[in-house]
C-alpha cells in the first residue's frame, strides 16, 4: 500500500521507520566537529615538548592509532548526544504539530537554554548561543530534507557521511597548503644571540639565575636534584653560589639544542647544561631532571627588561 502525505506537512516518524527520526544528523554534526578539529590542528603552531616527546618509530604509530580511536569514539558520542538533545526532539515536535517552523524554533530555544552553561562559566552568552545554535543548524537542515526525500534513510546517511569526509579531507589539504605544512613540522626553538642570554632568569620552581655579560653568573636559591649516597633516590636541595657561563651551539649528534653551560662548583648535583626553549620574545632555558621518561624538568624564564625612558 502506498502512503500519501498531505502537501505542506512533514512526514510522520512512522512513515520512515523508528531510526529515521533525524537521518544524517549525527553524521553531519560529527563531520562539523571533525572539520573543526582539522582546522584547529592545522592553525595551531607546534608546541614544545622540551625533548620529552616520543621519538620516531613504533611508539608514534601506536600513539597515532590510539588517538584516532579515541577521537572517533568521542565524535560519535558527541554526535549522538547532540541529536538526542537538539535535532530529534525538534523534528519530532515538527511532525506532531505539522509545522516546519517548530523545528528551528525548538533548536533556538534549546540552544538559548544550553548557552547558559558556558555563560555561567564566564563565556560571553551571545557567542555561546551563536556557536551552539549554529552547530545545530546544518544537522537539522539535512535531517529535515532527508525526511522529505523519497530516498531511503541509508542513502541519506551514506551521502552525508561521504560529503563530511570529503569536506574534512579538503580542509586538511587546503589548510596544509596555505600554512606550508607547518602543522606537520617540529617545534623550532628560538635562536638567541649571546647578548640575549645575559640578564635575569627566574625558575618555575623558585630561584634566580643572573647571567652577566662578562661571563660571570650568580645563582640564588635554585633547586638542584642530588642523588642520595648509596642509592638511586634523589633529594632536592637549594643552591646559592657563583660561577661562570658560556654560550653553547646546538649538537645534532646527540639531539641537543643550543643554550648555555652554567658552571657552578659549590653546589652538589649541579647540572651545567641548559637548552633554549620558548620564543624570541619570551625565551626559556630548561634541563631534564632524572629519568627522561618521567618527564622531570627545570625551567628558567627570562625576566623582561623594562623599557628605558
Image (cartoon, helix red, strand yellow):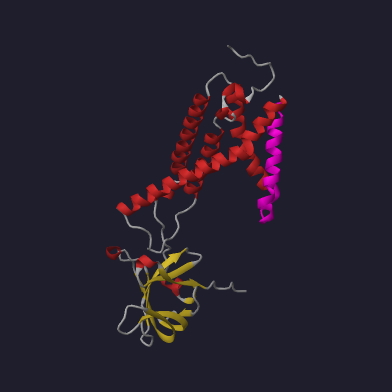
Q: Is residue 298 above or below residue 21?
A: below
Q: Is residue 209 above or below residue 29?
A: below
Q: Is residue 30 above or below residue 118?
A: above
Relative side of 112 to 52, left or right: right
Residue 164, horizontal then vertical, whole percent: 50, 34
77 or 156: which is nearer to us? 77
Q: Is residue 36 magenta?
A: no
Secondary structure mainly formed by the magenta segment: helix
Question: What's the residue at 66%, 47% (across, down)?
Answer: 128
20 or 149: which is nearer to us? 20
205 or 61: which is nearer to us? 61
- Seen as rendered, the residue at the extreme top is 1
Q: Is residue 81 above or below residue 150?
A: below
Question: What's the residue at 31%, 81% (across, down)?
Answer: 231
Residue 219, horizontal then vertical, whole percent: 45, 83
**Quarter the C terminus occupies:** bottom right
Question: What's the residue at 34%, 52% (across, down)?
Answer: 60
Give the quadrant of residue 86: top right
Residue 265, horizontal then vertical, whole percent: 35, 86
Q: Decide if residue 197 is in sight here.
A: yes
**Quarter the N terminus occupies:** top right
Residue 108, horizontal then vertical, whole percent: 70, 38
Range of magenta residues: 99-126
Relative side of 58 to 223, left or right: left
288 or 118: which is nearer to us? 118
Q: Is residue 105 magenta?
A: yes
Amino acid at each position: 500500500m502506498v502512503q500519501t502525505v498531505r502537501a505542506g506537512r512533514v512526514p510522520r516518524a512512522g512513515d520512515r521507520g523508528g531510526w529515521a527520526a533525524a537521518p544524517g544528523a549525527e553524521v553531519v554534526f560529527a563531520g562539523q566537529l571533525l572539520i573543526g578539529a582539522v582546522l584547529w590542528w592545522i592553525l595551531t603552531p607546534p608546541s614544545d615538548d622540551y625533548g620529552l616527546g616520543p621519538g620516531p618509530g613504533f611508539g608514534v604509530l601506536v600513539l597515532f592509532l590510539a588517538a584516532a580511536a579515541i577521537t572517533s569514539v568521542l565524535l560519535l558520542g558527541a554526535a549522538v548526544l547532540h541529536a538526542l538533545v537538539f535535532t530529534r526532539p525538534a523534528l519530532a515536535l515538527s511532525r506532531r504539530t505539522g509545522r516546519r517552523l517548530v523545528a528551528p524554533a525548538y533548536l533556538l530555544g534549546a540552544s538559548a537554554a544550553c548557552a547558559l552553561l558556558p555563560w555561567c562559566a564566564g563565556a560571553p552568552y551571545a557567542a555561546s548561543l551563536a556557536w551552539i545554535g549554529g552547530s545545530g543548524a546544518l544537522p537539522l537542515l539535512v535531517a529535515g530534507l532527508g525526511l522529505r526525500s523519497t530516498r531511503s534513510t541509508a542513502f541519506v546517511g551514506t551521502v552525508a557521511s561521504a560529503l563530511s569526509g570529503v569536506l574534512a579531507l579538503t580542509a586538511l589539504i587546503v589548510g596544509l597548503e596555505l600554512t606550508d605544512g607547518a602543522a606537520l613540522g617540529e617545534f623550532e626553538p628560538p635562536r638567541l644571540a649571546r647578548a640575549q642570554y645575559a640578564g635575569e632568569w627566574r625558575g618555575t620552581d623558585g630561584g634566580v639565575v643572573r647571567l652577566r655579560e662578562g661571563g660571570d653568573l650568580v645563582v640564588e636559591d635554585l633547586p638542584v636534584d642530588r642523588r642520595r649516597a648509596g642509592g638511586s633516590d634523589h633529594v632536592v636541595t637549594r643552591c646559592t653560589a657563583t660561577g661562570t657561563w658560556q654560550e653553547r651551539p646546538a649538537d645534532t649528534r646527540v639531539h641537543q639544542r643550543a643554550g648555555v653551560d652554567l658552571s657552578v662548583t659549590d653546589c652538589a648535583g649541579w647540572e651545567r647544561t641548559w637548552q633554549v626553549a620558548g620564543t624570541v620574545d619570551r625565551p626559556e632555558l630548561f634541563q631534564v631532571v632524572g629519568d627522561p621518561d618521567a618527564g622531570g624538568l627545570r625551567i628558567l624564564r627570562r625576566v623582561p627588561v623594562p623599557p628605558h625612558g
